[in-house]
Image (cartoon, rainbow, N blue to C red):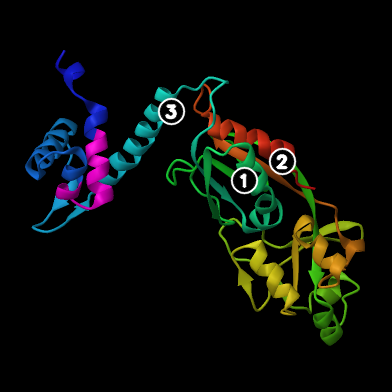
Amino acid sequence: MARLEINRSGEMEVFVRVVEQGGFSAAARTFRMTPSAVSKLIARLESRLGARLLNRSTRQFQLTAEGTAFYERSLRILADLEEAERGLGAAETPTGRIRLNTSASFGTHILAPLVPDFLALHPGVTLNIMQTDEVVDLFEERTDVAVRAGPLKNSRLVARKLGATPMVIVAAPAYLARFGTPASVAELERHNRLGFCYTRASEGWPLLRGGETVMLPTVGTVQASDGEALRYLAISGAGLTRLAAFTVREDIRAGRLVAVLEDCNPGDREDFHAVYLGQGGPLPARVRVLLDFLAERARVS
């Protein structure tokens, strides 16, 4: 019975406020408690958990490793409780914040133009959009949905495919005028090839040579962490790069970039998926409507 009498969610909420507001006094004012009462509550929580959550000094505190883990889990549990209280029925009006992680290229060329339409359809929803080409841990980063390019590894993530796009080698007309347009893989080897520098980047560019696919390393003077940076570098004349076709179609149409060695293109395509944590049970309405919207409107080709 003693375990049932403990207000665990209340303890979590007080602990979270202490961390977010930077001290016992500020958290105490939020809950109309005394700083001493908040301090005792945290001490009881640490005693029950058998772990120190905060290293205290006279004027400040620092989260321990256990405290950081408990803080992150508390955020997730409190968010789930909030969703449960609002109800997760199909008729629920979607409300709340969605944390969305995406690549810079997808975010710029496909997502951003669609955001006004999504918010108009769901005025109770707000979006936090983080752009990076690195793969993030959805749980650790408290991310609701991520859009990922490339093959998916087996994991606890659930995926909805958004399409696939061809890859294309491009360069600016000014660069080609200065250094020449490569007519073969051998000639391409002498050019400045701009590539990605994030940890999961491909080892090179697949190209057709003599009926076989070879991998040409991206050995160049600049490596960048995302596709938009490489796109702008190519437009500025820094070198050639290989990007998803949807990111450079308008540049090619406008003459800012030129497609190179298309006869050596092996025709590989890069898949795009919207992924989320597969925890079983119904999704929060805010997440569900975003996934449905992306599957219908944010198609990659």
Q: Position of residue 120 (x, y in %)?
A: 63, 41
Q: Which residue is mark 2?
A: 162
Q: Tell me the SS state at disc 3.
A: helix
In this view, the residue in front, 264 or 69, is 69
Q: Position of residue 222 (x, y in %)?
A: 64, 75
As measured in the structure, the alpha-carbon distance from the residue carrying label 3 to the one carrying label 2 is 27 Å
Q: Taking the image as drawn, is residue 232 in sight?
A: yes
Toward the bottom, the furthest residue is: 178
Q: Which residue is mark 1?
A: 147
Dot placed on the residue nearer the N-terminal end, 1 or 3: 3
Q: Tell me the SS state at disc 1.
A: strand
In this view, the residue in front, 285 or 76, is 285
Dot placed on the residue nearer the N-terminal end, 3 or 2: 3
Q: Is 243 placed left or right of 145 in the picture? A: right
Magenta part mainly helix, strand or loop?
helix
Q: Amino acid at mark 1?
A: Val
Q: Tell me the SS state at disc 2.
A: strand
